[in-house]
Amino acid sequence: MTRLTIIVPYSVDRSQQQRGVELLEDTLVSVLEHRPPSCQLIVAHDGSYADPYALQGEVEYLVDRGSRSRVDLINHALPQSTSEIAHILAPGVLVKDDWSDGVEQLFRDSRVASASPCIVRKDAPDRLVHLGLEYGGGGARLLVAAGRTVSDKRCQTAVALGPSLTAGFYRVDSVLAAGGFAGCVGDELADLDMALTLHARGFRSVVAGSCRVVADGESDRAAGFHGGRCLERLFWRHLNHHGLVRSFVAHPLSVLGRAVGDIPHPGSVLQLFGRTLAWLEWSTHRQFRLSLQAAETRKELEEPAATLSIRDHQAGLSRTHLSDAPRDSRRAA
């Protein structure tokens, strides 16, 4: 088994394809130059990348022409991992020598399911993009230490709910057992949704203080109709995270603050419309919360968990069949 699987998902609009290819190839060059030993490198793409430098052999290309998002591509690649740990890197992220050293040690604790690297800005190397994600009481996606000065102390002592899909380490079995990343909350919020899901299932996330990667800035906002719908879905899926009273008090203020912040852009109205439609999906959200509660109970009783498969999770279905047993056991079965 390899020590680390690196997954780079690539899917862009045709209007941005040239820029997207440049970002992807920047990341591939960076990883290949500083590749750790016993490492698997996967590029999951939608068929729009032609591999002009013939890297097949050094890079595994997984093509899923039906994928419409980064989340789809990541979910397609995760089951192909030959390592217990997957490192997801967005195109454009750069790595340095020994960037993954020490990560394996963090995952020796079976309760740790994810880890956040220290993401440093390309245009300001002394500033952080962030150190991971947190979840606001009203349902907001928050970036830990965004824009703060890089320091060893800050990187070593920071606490985060989970990593972002810009650059994050995950225990593959834990993510698969949780049903994979949820496409229903969009590429912008799937990382936070996974962080909340793993937390509810009894897992921990840590900040890998010695791991540094370089990236452009990252927005913590999901805007417009699609963004509003995804934000509202996220809130109702994880209503219990902060407690019902705090959530119900903080949520209207969060919604109002985002709407006012978008004025005079028409996205303000569209976001509220998207939220309204997502609220009408309350039965699906309730079903998901019940599945989390059941999984948490099984964890406490130390029983095998049964959760949604990746495809069922994306489709919002309720049948459960994927075991929480280690992946080697599943293969043997």
Image (cartoon, rainbow, N blue to C red):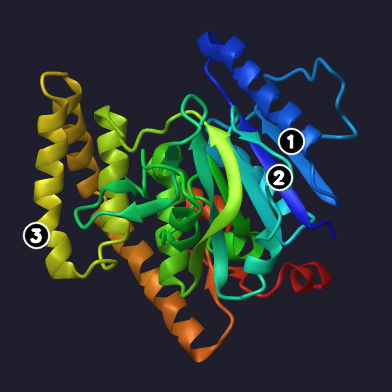
119 relative to 306, above or below: above
- Residue bearing the label numbered 1: 31
Residue at the image position 62 percent from the left and 44 percent from the top: 88
In the rendered image, the quadrant that contains the N terminus is: bottom right
x, y percent for residue 326: 70, 72
Write down the residue under mark 3: 249
Packing grade of label 3 (10 A; few <14, some 14-19, many >=20) is few
N-terminal of the pair, mark 3 or mark 1, is 1
Q: Quadrant of residue 294?
A: bottom left
Q: Which residue is mark 2?
A: 6
Mark 1 residue type: Val
Nearer the camera: disc 2 or disc 1:
1
The reply to whether the C-beta atoms of the residues labelled 2 and 1 are less than 8 Å apart is: yes
Question: What amino acid type is highlighted by mark number 2?
Answer: Ile
Residue 152 numbered tag: none
Tell me if residue 285 comes above or below residue 33 in the rendering.
below
CA gap between label 2 and label 1 equals: 9 Å
Vertical arrangement, residue 201 with respect to residue 11, above or below: below
Location of residue 76 by image quarter: top right
